[in-house]
Image (tube, coloured by chain):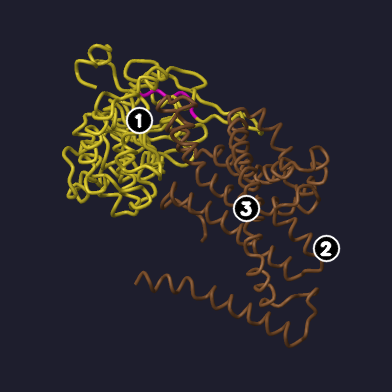
Amino acid sequence: MTEAEQAESGAVTAPAVELHAVHKSFTARRGTVVALADVDLTIERGEFVSLIGPSGCGKSTLLRVIADLLQPSGGEVQVNGKPARRARLDQDYGIAFQQAGLLDWRTVQANIELPLELHGVDRAERHARAEELIELVGLTEFARHRPPQLSGGMQQRVAIARALAESPALLLMDEPFGALDEMTRERMQNELVRIAGETGAAVVFVTHSIPEAVFLSDRVVVMSARPGRIVNVVPIGLGARTDDTREAPGFYAAITQVREALRGLPVPQTVEVGVSVENALRNSAEGAL
Amino acid sequence: MNLRRVGVTLLPPIVFGVLFVGGWQAFVRLEDVRTFVLPAPSDIWHSVTEAHSRIVTAAGHSGLNALVGLLTGVILGVALAALAARLPILGGAVTPVVAALAAMPIVALAPLLNNMYSPLSTLPRREVVALSAFVPVFFNVLRGLSQLAPVHRELMQSYAASQTAVLRVIRIPNALPHFFTGLRIASSLAVIAAVVSEYFGGLQDGLGSRITSSVGASDYPGAWASVLGSVVLGLVFYIAAVLLERLVLGSRATSPV
Protein backbone atom coordinates (compact mmCIF):
# COMPACT_ATOMS: atom_id res chain seq x y z
CA MET A 1 0.00 0.00 0.00
CA THR A 2 1.33 3.45 -0.80
CA GLU A 3 1.33 6.27 1.71
CA ALA A 4 -1.48 7.95 -0.17
CA GLU A 5 -3.68 4.87 -0.02
CA GLN A 6 -2.99 4.49 3.67
CA ALA A 7 -4.00 8.06 4.27
CA GLU A 8 -7.13 7.45 2.24
CA SER A 9 -8.12 4.52 4.42
CA GLY A 10 -7.51 6.69 7.46
CA ALA A 11 -5.16 4.10 8.87
CA VAL A 12 -1.91 5.97 8.67
CA THR A 13 -1.92 7.06 12.28
CA ALA A 14 -3.43 3.95 13.82
CA PRO A 15 -1.10 1.42 15.49
CA ALA A 16 -0.46 -1.81 13.58
CA VAL A 17 -2.14 -3.86 16.31
CA GLU A 18 -4.23 -2.86 19.32
CA LEU A 19 -5.46 -5.47 21.77
CA HIS A 20 -7.73 -4.58 24.67
CA ALA A 21 -8.66 -7.12 27.36
CA VAL A 22 -8.49 -9.97 24.85
CA HIS A 23 -9.74 -13.23 26.23
CA LYS A 24 -9.91 -16.61 24.52
CA SER A 25 -11.21 -19.86 25.95
CA PHE A 26 -11.72 -23.19 24.24
CA THR A 27 -14.42 -25.58 25.36
CA ALA A 28 -13.00 -29.07 25.42
CA ARG A 29 -14.58 -32.33 26.60
CA ARG A 30 -13.02 -31.92 30.02
CA GLY A 31 -14.20 -28.39 30.50
CA THR A 32 -13.07 -24.95 29.50
CA VAL A 33 -9.44 -24.13 28.82
CA VAL A 34 -8.46 -20.50 29.09
CA ALA A 35 -5.90 -19.92 26.34
CA LEU A 36 -5.64 -16.16 26.70
CA ALA A 37 -6.61 -14.01 29.65
CA ASP A 38 -6.67 -10.24 29.78
CA VAL A 39 -4.24 -9.48 27.01
CA ASP A 40 -3.51 -5.80 26.38
CA LEU A 41 -0.90 -4.92 23.81
CA THR A 42 -0.24 -2.13 21.34
CA ILE A 43 2.18 -2.62 18.46
CA GLU A 44 3.22 0.52 16.65
CA ARG A 45 3.61 0.82 12.89
CA GLY A 46 6.91 -0.64 11.75
CA GLU A 47 7.65 -2.11 15.15
CA PHE A 48 9.09 -5.61 15.49
CA VAL A 49 7.55 -7.50 18.41
CA SER A 50 8.24 -11.10 19.42
CA LEU A 51 5.91 -13.23 21.51
CA ILE A 52 7.80 -15.70 23.65
CA GLY A 53 6.78 -18.14 26.36
CA PRO A 54 6.51 -21.81 27.24
CA SER A 55 4.38 -24.23 25.20
CA GLY A 56 0.71 -23.63 25.83
CA CYS A 57 1.14 -19.98 26.77
CA GLY A 58 -1.18 -18.99 23.95
CA LYS A 59 1.32 -17.10 21.79
CA SER A 60 0.21 -18.87 18.61
CA THR A 61 -3.40 -18.41 19.66
CA LEU A 62 -2.76 -14.70 20.13
CA LEU A 63 -1.23 -14.50 16.65
CA ARG A 64 -4.29 -16.22 15.19
CA VAL A 65 -6.62 -13.87 17.04
CA ILE A 66 -4.78 -10.91 15.50
CA ALA A 67 -5.02 -12.65 12.10
CA ASP A 68 -8.77 -13.20 12.62
CA LEU A 69 -8.21 -16.93 12.08
CA LEU A 70 -9.62 -17.41 15.60
CA GLN A 71 -12.37 -15.36 17.20
CA PRO A 72 -11.58 -13.99 20.67
CA SER A 73 -14.08 -14.91 23.39
CA GLY A 74 -13.90 -11.36 24.66
CA GLY A 75 -12.09 -8.07 24.25
CA GLU A 76 -11.25 -5.95 21.27
CA VAL A 77 -8.79 -6.56 18.43
CA GLN A 78 -7.86 -3.74 16.06
CA VAL A 79 -5.46 -4.14 13.16
CA ASN A 80 -4.43 -1.05 11.24
CA GLY A 81 -7.17 0.83 13.05
CA LYS A 82 -9.88 -1.57 11.86
CA PRO A 83 -11.62 -4.54 13.44
CA ALA A 84 -9.52 -7.70 12.82
CA ARG A 85 -12.07 -9.16 10.42
CA ARG A 86 -12.11 -6.05 8.25
CA ALA A 87 -8.30 -6.03 8.24
CA ARG A 88 -8.21 -9.66 7.11
CA LEU A 89 -10.73 -9.00 4.33
CA ASP A 90 -8.69 -5.96 3.27
CA GLN A 91 -5.48 -8.02 3.27
CA ASP A 92 -3.83 -5.67 5.75
CA TYR A 93 -1.49 -8.39 6.98
CA GLY A 94 0.65 -11.13 5.48
CA ILE A 95 1.20 -14.37 7.36
CA ALA A 96 3.86 -17.11 7.48
CA PHE A 97 3.76 -20.33 9.48
CA GLN A 98 6.28 -22.86 10.76
CA GLN A 99 5.48 -25.01 7.75
CA ALA A 100 6.13 -23.04 4.59
CA GLY A 101 2.84 -24.39 3.20
CA LEU A 102 3.86 -23.88 -0.42
CA LEU A 103 1.93 -25.50 -3.23
CA ASP A 104 4.26 -28.19 -4.59
CA TRP A 105 2.80 -28.07 -8.10
CA ARG A 106 3.49 -24.37 -8.54
CA THR A 107 6.83 -22.75 -9.27
CA VAL A 108 8.42 -20.39 -6.73
CA GLN A 109 7.15 -17.49 -8.80
CA ALA A 110 3.59 -18.84 -9.02
CA ASN A 111 3.57 -19.53 -5.27
CA ILE A 112 4.46 -15.93 -4.52
CA GLU A 113 1.82 -14.75 -6.98
CA LEU A 114 -0.89 -16.84 -5.31
CA PRO A 115 -2.41 -14.14 -3.08
CA LEU A 116 -2.26 -11.59 -5.90
CA GLU A 117 -3.89 -14.04 -8.29
CA LEU A 118 -6.68 -14.74 -5.76
CA HIS A 119 -7.33 -11.04 -5.43
CA GLY A 120 -7.56 -10.39 -9.14
CA VAL A 121 -4.28 -8.57 -9.77
CA ASP A 122 -3.54 -8.75 -13.48
CA ARG A 123 -0.83 -10.98 -14.85
CA ALA A 124 1.78 -8.36 -15.75
CA GLU A 125 1.55 -6.64 -12.38
CA ARG A 126 1.71 -10.03 -10.61
CA HIS A 127 4.86 -11.00 -12.46
CA ALA A 128 6.55 -7.70 -11.75
CA ARG A 129 5.70 -7.83 -8.05
CA ALA A 130 6.80 -11.48 -7.74
CA GLU A 131 10.11 -10.69 -9.42
CA GLU A 132 10.72 -7.85 -6.97
CA LEU A 133 10.00 -10.13 -4.03
CA ILE A 134 12.10 -12.98 -5.38
CA GLU A 135 14.99 -10.56 -5.57
CA LEU A 136 14.24 -9.28 -2.06
CA VAL A 137 14.54 -12.80 -0.61
CA GLY A 138 17.51 -13.67 -2.81
CA LEU A 139 16.00 -16.47 -4.90
CA THR A 140 16.35 -15.00 -8.38
CA GLU A 141 17.95 -18.13 -9.80
CA PHE A 142 15.20 -20.31 -8.38
CA ALA A 143 12.10 -18.52 -9.71
CA ARG A 144 11.23 -21.44 -12.00
CA HIS A 145 11.96 -24.16 -9.44
CA ARG A 146 9.28 -26.06 -7.59
CA PRO A 147 9.23 -26.22 -3.76
CA PRO A 148 10.30 -29.89 -3.44
CA GLN A 149 13.56 -28.93 -5.19
CA LEU A 150 14.37 -26.30 -2.54
CA SER A 151 15.94 -26.55 0.93
CA GLY A 152 13.88 -25.79 4.04
CA GLY A 153 15.41 -22.33 4.36
CA MET A 154 14.68 -21.49 0.74
CA GLN A 155 11.09 -22.69 1.11
CA GLN A 156 10.67 -20.43 4.10
CA ARG A 157 12.04 -17.49 2.09
CA VAL A 158 9.39 -18.17 -0.54
CA ALA A 159 6.73 -18.23 2.20
CA ILE A 160 7.97 -14.87 3.51
CA ALA A 161 7.98 -13.40 0.00
CA ARG A 162 4.42 -14.66 -0.45
CA ALA A 163 3.40 -13.05 2.86
CA LEU A 164 4.82 -9.74 1.60
CA ALA A 165 3.12 -9.97 -1.80
CA GLU A 166 0.43 -7.39 -1.07
CA SER A 167 2.84 -5.01 0.70
CA PRO A 168 1.06 -5.45 4.04
CA ALA A 169 1.65 -3.03 6.88
CA LEU A 170 1.78 -6.01 9.22
CA LEU A 171 3.60 -9.32 8.96
CA LEU A 172 2.47 -12.17 11.24
CA MET A 173 4.95 -15.01 11.71
CA ASP A 174 4.34 -18.20 13.69
CA GLU A 175 7.72 -19.81 14.41
CA PRO A 176 8.72 -19.54 10.76
CA PHE A 177 12.30 -20.66 11.44
CA GLY A 178 11.37 -23.35 13.98
CA ALA A 179 12.19 -26.23 11.65
CA LEU A 180 15.49 -24.86 10.33
CA ASP A 181 19.02 -25.73 11.44
CA GLU A 182 20.89 -23.18 13.56
CA MET A 183 23.12 -21.76 10.80
CA THR A 184 20.26 -21.32 8.35
CA ARG A 185 18.19 -19.89 11.13
CA GLU A 186 20.68 -17.13 11.91
CA ARG A 187 21.03 -16.28 8.24
CA MET A 188 17.24 -16.08 7.93
CA GLN A 189 17.12 -13.81 10.98
CA ASN A 190 19.62 -11.42 9.37
CA GLU A 191 17.48 -11.48 6.23
CA LEU A 192 14.29 -10.83 8.15
CA VAL A 193 15.75 -7.80 9.95
CA ARG A 194 16.76 -6.40 6.57
CA ILE A 195 13.42 -7.22 4.92
CA ALA A 196 11.39 -5.75 7.80
CA GLY A 197 13.54 -2.60 7.56
CA GLU A 198 13.16 -2.32 3.80
CA THR A 199 9.41 -2.90 3.76
CA GLY A 200 8.67 -0.87 6.88
CA ALA A 201 6.15 -3.50 7.96
CA ALA A 202 5.37 -4.13 11.61
CA VAL A 203 6.11 -7.74 12.55
CA VAL A 204 4.55 -9.98 15.19
CA PHE A 205 6.88 -12.92 15.58
CA VAL A 206 6.11 -16.03 17.63
CA THR A 207 9.14 -18.00 18.79
CA HIS A 208 10.51 -20.39 21.41
CA SER A 209 14.02 -19.07 21.09
CA ILE A 210 15.23 -16.30 23.40
CA PRO A 211 18.25 -15.28 21.25
CA GLU A 212 16.03 -15.20 18.19
CA ALA A 213 13.46 -12.97 19.89
CA VAL A 214 16.17 -10.66 21.23
CA PHE A 215 18.05 -10.39 17.95
CA LEU A 216 14.98 -9.59 15.88
CA SER A 217 12.82 -7.44 18.08
CA ASP A 218 12.23 -3.92 19.24
CA ARG A 219 10.23 -5.41 22.09
CA VAL A 220 9.91 -8.96 23.45
CA VAL A 221 6.54 -9.87 24.93
CA VAL A 222 6.95 -12.58 27.58
CA MET A 223 3.92 -14.79 28.17
CA SER A 224 3.02 -17.39 30.80
CA ALA A 225 0.90 -20.50 30.45
CA ARG A 226 -2.45 -21.56 31.97
CA PRO A 227 -3.95 -19.11 31.55
CA GLY A 228 -1.97 -17.51 28.75
CA ARG A 229 -1.20 -13.94 29.70
CA ILE A 230 1.43 -11.29 29.16
CA VAL A 231 3.73 -11.14 32.17
CA ASN A 232 6.38 -8.79 30.91
CA VAL A 233 7.39 -6.65 27.96
CA VAL A 234 11.14 -6.25 27.52
CA PRO A 235 12.32 -3.43 25.25
CA ILE A 236 15.41 -4.27 23.22
CA GLY A 237 17.58 -1.60 21.68
CA LEU A 238 20.22 -3.31 19.60
CA GLY A 239 20.07 -0.80 16.74
CA ALA A 240 21.47 -1.89 13.37
CA ARG A 241 22.10 -5.63 13.52
CA THR A 242 24.91 -7.62 11.94
CA ASP A 243 26.48 -10.96 12.75
CA ASP A 244 28.66 -9.09 15.29
CA THR A 245 25.54 -8.12 17.19
CA ARG A 246 25.25 -11.75 18.29
CA GLU A 247 28.54 -11.42 20.16
CA ALA A 248 27.94 -7.95 21.61
CA PRO A 249 27.52 -7.48 25.39
CA GLY A 250 24.18 -5.70 24.86
CA PHE A 251 22.84 -8.79 23.13
CA TYR A 252 23.75 -11.02 26.08
CA ALA A 253 22.39 -8.54 28.58
CA ALA A 254 19.06 -8.49 26.74
CA ILE A 255 19.00 -12.31 26.58
CA THR A 256 19.55 -12.44 30.34
CA GLN A 257 16.76 -9.96 30.85
CA VAL A 258 14.28 -12.00 28.81
CA ARG A 259 15.42 -15.25 30.40
CA GLU A 260 14.84 -13.88 33.86
CA ALA A 261 11.47 -12.56 32.87
CA LEU A 262 10.60 -16.06 31.64
CA ARG A 263 11.95 -17.70 34.80
CA GLY A 264 9.82 -15.44 36.92
CA LEU A 265 6.71 -16.92 35.34
CA PRO A 266 5.14 -18.72 38.31
CA VAL A 267 4.95 -15.43 40.23
CA PRO A 268 4.26 -12.80 37.60
CA GLN A 269 3.13 -10.33 40.28
CA THR A 270 6.64 -9.74 41.55
CA VAL A 271 9.13 -7.85 39.42
CA GLU A 272 12.25 -9.96 39.01
CA VAL A 273 15.76 -8.73 39.62
CA GLY A 274 17.31 -7.83 36.29
CA VAL A 275 14.16 -6.40 34.81
CA SER A 276 14.65 -2.69 35.01
CA VAL A 277 12.32 -0.43 36.94
CA GLU A 278 11.65 1.35 33.69
CA ASN A 279 10.35 -1.95 32.34
CA ALA A 280 8.11 -2.58 35.25
CA LEU A 281 6.69 0.92 34.95
CA ARG A 282 6.15 0.49 31.27
CA ASN A 283 4.36 -2.81 31.83
CA SER A 284 2.06 -1.46 34.45
CA ALA A 285 1.41 1.56 32.28
CA GLU A 286 0.30 -0.74 29.48
CA GLY A 287 -1.76 -2.77 31.87
CA ALA A 288 0.17 -5.86 30.95
CA LEU A 289 0.66 -7.04 34.49
CA MET B 1 24.17 -44.43 -19.21
CA ASN B 2 20.46 -44.12 -19.88
CA LEU B 3 20.53 -47.25 -22.03
CA ARG B 4 22.17 -49.09 -19.18
CA ARG B 5 19.44 -47.98 -16.79
CA VAL B 6 16.80 -49.26 -19.21
CA GLY B 7 18.71 -52.54 -19.37
CA VAL B 8 18.89 -52.84 -15.60
CA THR B 9 15.15 -52.15 -15.37
CA LEU B 10 14.12 -54.52 -18.13
CA LEU B 11 16.52 -57.40 -17.65
CA PRO B 12 15.14 -58.95 -14.45
CA PRO B 13 11.51 -59.23 -15.68
CA ILE B 14 12.67 -60.59 -19.05
CA VAL B 15 14.90 -63.21 -17.43
CA PHE B 16 12.12 -64.13 -15.04
CA GLY B 17 9.58 -64.36 -17.87
CA VAL B 18 11.82 -66.59 -20.00
CA LEU B 19 12.59 -68.87 -17.04
CA PHE B 20 8.91 -69.05 -16.10
CA VAL B 21 7.65 -69.90 -19.59
CA GLY B 22 10.58 -72.28 -20.17
CA GLY B 23 9.94 -74.03 -16.85
CA TRP B 24 6.24 -74.30 -17.68
CA GLN B 25 7.02 -75.81 -21.09
CA ALA B 26 9.51 -78.28 -19.61
CA PHE B 27 7.15 -79.24 -16.80
CA VAL B 28 4.23 -79.97 -19.15
CA ARG B 29 6.39 -81.94 -21.60
CA LEU B 30 8.44 -83.91 -19.06
CA GLU B 31 5.53 -84.71 -16.74
CA ASP B 32 3.24 -85.39 -19.72
CA VAL B 33 0.50 -83.16 -18.28
CA ARG B 34 -2.84 -83.58 -20.08
CA THR B 35 -3.92 -80.62 -22.23
CA PHE B 36 -7.21 -80.01 -20.35
CA VAL B 37 -5.25 -79.71 -17.10
CA LEU B 38 -2.55 -77.38 -18.40
CA PRO B 39 -1.57 -76.89 -22.05
CA ALA B 40 2.07 -76.17 -22.88
CA PRO B 41 3.00 -72.57 -23.81
CA SER B 42 3.84 -73.82 -27.33
CA ASP B 43 0.28 -75.18 -27.75
CA ILE B 44 -1.18 -71.89 -26.56
CA TRP B 45 1.08 -69.93 -28.90
CA HIS B 46 -0.01 -72.19 -31.76
CA SER B 47 -3.63 -71.32 -30.95
CA VAL B 48 -2.80 -67.64 -30.79
CA THR B 49 -1.19 -67.62 -34.26
CA GLU B 50 -4.03 -69.72 -35.70
CA ALA B 51 -6.89 -67.61 -34.31
CA HIS B 52 -4.99 -64.34 -34.23
CA SER B 53 -7.45 -62.18 -36.15
CA ARG B 54 -10.47 -63.57 -34.28
CA ILE B 55 -8.83 -62.90 -30.92
CA VAL B 56 -8.09 -59.34 -32.00
CA THR B 57 -11.70 -58.82 -33.11
CA ALA B 58 -12.98 -60.25 -29.82
CA ALA B 59 -10.52 -58.08 -27.88
CA GLY B 60 -11.90 -55.10 -29.81
CA HIS B 61 -15.45 -55.86 -28.63
CA SER B 62 -14.43 -56.48 -25.02
CA GLY B 63 -12.11 -53.48 -25.15
CA LEU B 64 -14.86 -51.19 -26.39
CA ASN B 65 -17.14 -52.33 -23.55
CA ALA B 66 -14.31 -51.79 -21.09
CA LEU B 67 -13.53 -48.34 -22.49
CA VAL B 68 -17.13 -47.07 -22.56
CA GLY B 69 -17.78 -48.49 -19.10
CA LEU B 70 -14.51 -47.09 -17.75
CA LEU B 71 -15.22 -43.57 -19.05
CA THR B 72 -18.76 -43.69 -17.64
CA GLY B 73 -17.52 -44.94 -14.27
CA VAL B 74 -14.76 -42.35 -14.10
CA ILE B 75 -17.11 -39.48 -14.94
CA LEU B 76 -19.64 -40.69 -12.37
CA GLY B 77 -16.93 -41.29 -9.77
CA VAL B 78 -15.43 -37.83 -10.16
CA ALA B 79 -18.84 -36.11 -10.23
CA LEU B 80 -20.17 -37.88 -7.16
CA ALA B 81 -16.90 -37.43 -5.24
CA ALA B 82 -16.98 -33.71 -6.03
CA LEU B 83 -20.57 -33.49 -4.75
CA ALA B 84 -19.76 -35.55 -1.66
CA ALA B 85 -16.74 -33.36 -0.88
CA ARG B 86 -18.78 -30.18 -1.31
CA LEU B 87 -21.86 -31.35 0.60
CA PRO B 88 -20.79 -33.35 3.66
CA ILE B 89 -24.38 -34.48 4.27
CA LEU B 90 -24.50 -36.08 0.84
CA GLY B 91 -21.02 -37.50 1.40
CA GLY B 92 -22.14 -39.10 4.64
CA ALA B 93 -25.14 -40.63 2.88
CA VAL B 94 -23.33 -41.84 -0.23
CA THR B 95 -20.01 -43.10 1.14
CA PRO B 96 -21.39 -46.13 3.06
CA VAL B 97 -23.41 -47.16 -0.01
CA VAL B 98 -20.30 -47.02 -2.19
CA ALA B 99 -18.37 -48.92 0.49
CA ALA B 100 -21.03 -51.65 0.36
CA LEU B 101 -20.76 -51.61 -3.42
CA ALA B 102 -16.98 -52.03 -3.09
CA ALA B 103 -17.43 -55.04 -0.82
CA MET B 104 -19.71 -56.73 -3.37
CA PRO B 105 -18.16 -58.68 -6.25
CA ILE B 106 -19.65 -56.46 -8.91
CA VAL B 107 -19.34 -59.01 -11.72
CA ALA B 108 -21.82 -61.07 -9.69
CA LEU B 109 -24.38 -58.54 -10.90
CA ALA B 110 -23.76 -59.50 -14.54
CA PRO B 111 -26.36 -62.31 -14.81
CA LEU B 112 -28.98 -60.13 -13.12
CA LEU B 113 -28.30 -57.16 -15.38
CA ASN B 114 -28.32 -59.50 -18.42
CA ASN B 115 -31.94 -60.34 -17.59
CA MET B 116 -32.97 -56.71 -17.76
CA TYR B 117 -31.92 -56.15 -21.35
CA SER B 118 -32.18 -57.79 -24.75
CA PRO B 119 -29.73 -60.69 -25.16
CA LEU B 120 -27.96 -58.74 -27.90
CA SER B 121 -27.36 -55.65 -25.77
CA THR B 122 -23.85 -54.64 -24.68
CA LEU B 123 -25.40 -52.37 -22.05
CA PRO B 124 -25.39 -54.78 -19.07
CA ARG B 125 -21.65 -55.43 -19.54
CA ARG B 126 -20.85 -51.77 -19.77
CA GLU B 127 -22.87 -51.15 -16.64
CA VAL B 128 -20.88 -53.78 -14.75
CA VAL B 129 -17.64 -52.18 -15.98
CA ALA B 130 -18.85 -48.70 -15.06
CA LEU B 131 -19.76 -49.83 -11.53
CA SER B 132 -16.38 -51.56 -11.08
CA ALA B 133 -14.46 -48.51 -12.29
CA PHE B 134 -16.63 -46.07 -10.35
CA VAL B 135 -15.67 -47.36 -6.89
CA PRO B 136 -11.88 -46.76 -6.83
CA VAL B 137 -12.23 -43.45 -8.65
CA PHE B 138 -14.88 -42.22 -6.21
CA PHE B 139 -12.89 -43.11 -3.09
CA ASN B 140 -9.57 -41.78 -4.31
CA VAL B 141 -10.95 -38.51 -5.65
CA LEU B 142 -13.03 -37.98 -2.50
CA ARG B 143 -9.94 -38.48 -0.35
CA GLY B 144 -7.91 -36.12 -2.52
CA LEU B 145 -10.58 -33.43 -2.43
CA SER B 146 -11.17 -33.75 1.30
CA GLN B 147 -7.54 -33.45 2.36
CA LEU B 148 -6.66 -29.89 3.20
CA ALA B 149 -3.50 -29.32 5.25
CA PRO B 150 -4.14 -27.01 8.25
CA VAL B 151 -1.47 -24.62 6.99
CA HIS B 152 -3.25 -24.32 3.63
CA ARG B 153 -6.64 -23.91 5.30
CA GLU B 154 -5.33 -21.06 7.46
CA LEU B 155 -3.48 -19.50 4.56
CA MET B 156 -6.59 -19.46 2.37
CA GLN B 157 -8.61 -18.13 5.30
CA SER B 158 -6.09 -15.31 5.69
CA TYR B 159 -6.58 -14.53 1.99
CA ALA B 160 -10.34 -14.42 2.60
CA ALA B 161 -10.56 -16.92 -0.28
CA SER B 162 -13.94 -18.38 -1.23
CA GLN B 163 -14.65 -22.12 -1.12
CA THR B 164 -14.59 -22.13 -4.91
CA ALA B 165 -11.13 -20.57 -4.92
CA VAL B 166 -9.89 -23.13 -2.39
CA LEU B 167 -11.29 -25.85 -4.65
CA ARG B 168 -9.59 -24.47 -7.73
CA VAL B 169 -6.26 -23.53 -6.22
CA ILE B 170 -5.69 -26.31 -3.70
CA ARG B 171 -8.23 -29.12 -3.59
CA ILE B 172 -8.30 -30.02 -7.28
CA PRO B 173 -4.51 -29.96 -7.83
CA ASN B 174 -4.22 -31.92 -4.57
CA ALA B 175 -6.73 -34.49 -5.80
CA LEU B 176 -5.11 -35.07 -9.20
CA PRO B 177 -2.53 -37.66 -8.07
CA HIS B 178 -5.30 -39.44 -6.16
CA PHE B 179 -7.49 -39.37 -9.25
CA PHE B 180 -4.79 -41.08 -11.29
CA THR B 181 -4.25 -43.71 -8.62
CA GLY B 182 -7.98 -44.43 -8.87
CA LEU B 183 -7.84 -44.42 -12.66
CA ARG B 184 -4.97 -46.93 -12.71
CA ILE B 185 -6.89 -49.34 -10.49
CA ALA B 186 -10.10 -48.72 -12.45
CA SER B 187 -8.43 -49.34 -15.83
CA SER B 188 -7.37 -52.86 -14.81
CA LEU B 189 -10.71 -53.58 -13.14
CA ALA B 190 -12.55 -52.41 -16.26
CA VAL B 191 -10.97 -55.07 -18.47
CA ILE B 192 -11.51 -57.80 -15.87
CA ALA B 193 -15.15 -56.76 -15.48
CA ALA B 194 -15.69 -56.57 -19.25
CA VAL B 195 -14.27 -60.06 -19.86
CA VAL B 196 -15.83 -61.82 -16.88
CA SER B 197 -19.28 -60.30 -17.43
CA GLU B 198 -19.34 -62.13 -20.78
CA TYR B 199 -19.24 -65.50 -18.97
CA PHE B 200 -22.94 -65.21 -18.15
CA GLY B 201 -24.45 -65.42 -21.61
CA GLY B 202 -25.74 -62.63 -23.81
CA LEU B 203 -23.89 -61.41 -26.87
CA GLN B 204 -21.10 -63.86 -27.90
CA ASP B 205 -18.55 -61.50 -29.41
CA GLY B 206 -15.87 -60.82 -26.78
CA LEU B 207 -12.86 -62.49 -25.20
CA GLY B 208 -14.87 -63.80 -22.25
CA SER B 209 -17.34 -65.50 -24.60
CA ARG B 210 -14.41 -67.02 -26.52
CA ILE B 211 -12.98 -68.40 -23.28
CA THR B 212 -16.27 -70.07 -22.25
CA SER B 213 -17.02 -71.40 -25.74
CA SER B 214 -13.46 -72.75 -26.16
CA VAL B 215 -13.73 -74.54 -22.83
CA GLY B 216 -17.15 -75.86 -23.88
CA ALA B 217 -15.57 -77.26 -27.06
CA SER B 218 -12.65 -78.76 -25.07
CA ASP B 219 -10.27 -76.42 -26.94
CA TYR B 220 -8.13 -75.61 -23.92
CA PRO B 221 -5.18 -74.04 -25.74
CA GLY B 222 -7.77 -71.84 -27.50
CA ALA B 223 -9.24 -70.77 -24.13
CA TRP B 224 -5.76 -69.94 -22.85
CA ALA B 225 -5.04 -68.01 -26.04
CA SER B 226 -8.07 -65.80 -25.28
CA VAL B 227 -6.88 -65.44 -21.67
CA LEU B 228 -3.58 -64.22 -23.08
CA GLY B 229 -5.57 -61.75 -25.22
CA SER B 230 -7.27 -60.46 -22.03
CA VAL B 231 -3.90 -60.02 -20.33
CA VAL B 232 -2.64 -57.95 -23.25
CA LEU B 233 -5.87 -55.91 -23.29
CA GLY B 234 -5.55 -55.28 -19.54
CA LEU B 235 -1.95 -54.15 -19.97
CA VAL B 236 -2.92 -51.78 -22.77
CA PHE B 237 -5.51 -50.14 -20.50
CA TYR B 238 -3.12 -49.93 -17.56
CA ILE B 239 -0.26 -48.51 -19.60
CA ALA B 240 -2.59 -45.97 -21.20
CA ALA B 241 -3.61 -44.83 -17.71
CA VAL B 242 0.03 -44.59 -16.59
CA LEU B 243 1.02 -42.61 -19.69
CA LEU B 244 -1.89 -40.22 -19.19
CA GLU B 245 -0.76 -39.74 -15.58
CA ARG B 246 2.81 -39.02 -16.67
CA LEU B 247 1.57 -36.60 -19.30
CA VAL B 248 -0.61 -34.63 -16.89
CA LEU B 249 1.42 -34.80 -13.66
CA GLY B 250 4.99 -34.96 -14.95
CA SER B 251 7.31 -35.31 -11.97
CA ARG B 252 4.38 -35.57 -9.55
CA ALA B 253 3.35 -38.93 -11.05
CA THR B 254 3.23 -41.68 -8.43
CA SER B 255 2.76 -44.73 -10.66
CA PRO B 256 5.24 -47.48 -9.78
CA VAL B 257 6.01 -48.60 -13.35
Magenta stretch bounds: A36-41
Q: Quadrant of the N terminus of chain A?
A: top left
Task: Tell me, by letter, which chain the rendering colours brown.
Answer: B
Q: Is residue B138 left or right of residue B11?
A: right
Which residue is tagged 3? B60
> Between disc 2 and disc 3, whose residue precedes?
3
Which residue is tagged 1? A115
Tell whether label 2 touches label 1 (CB within 8 Å): no
- At horizontal 52% and vertical 41% (from top left) the residue drawn is B175
Task: Single out the residue that lies furthest toward the bottom.
Answer: B30
**Which corner quadrant of the image does residue A78 belong to?**
top left
Labels 1 and 2 share a subunit? no
Other residues around mark 1 within 10 Å, as few (<14) / some (14–19) / many (≥20): many
Which residue is tagged 2? B216
Disc 1 from disc 3: Cα separation: 50 Å
Q: Nearer the viewer, residue B56 or B165?
A: B56
Protein chain holding label 1: A
- At horizontal 29% and vertical 30% (from top left) the residue drawn is A279
- Picture coordinates of residue B246 (x, y %)? 45, 52
Task: Tell me, by letter, which chain the rendering colours yellow.
Answer: A
For badge 3, the amino acid type reads Gly
**Overall secondary structure of the magenta stretch?**
strand
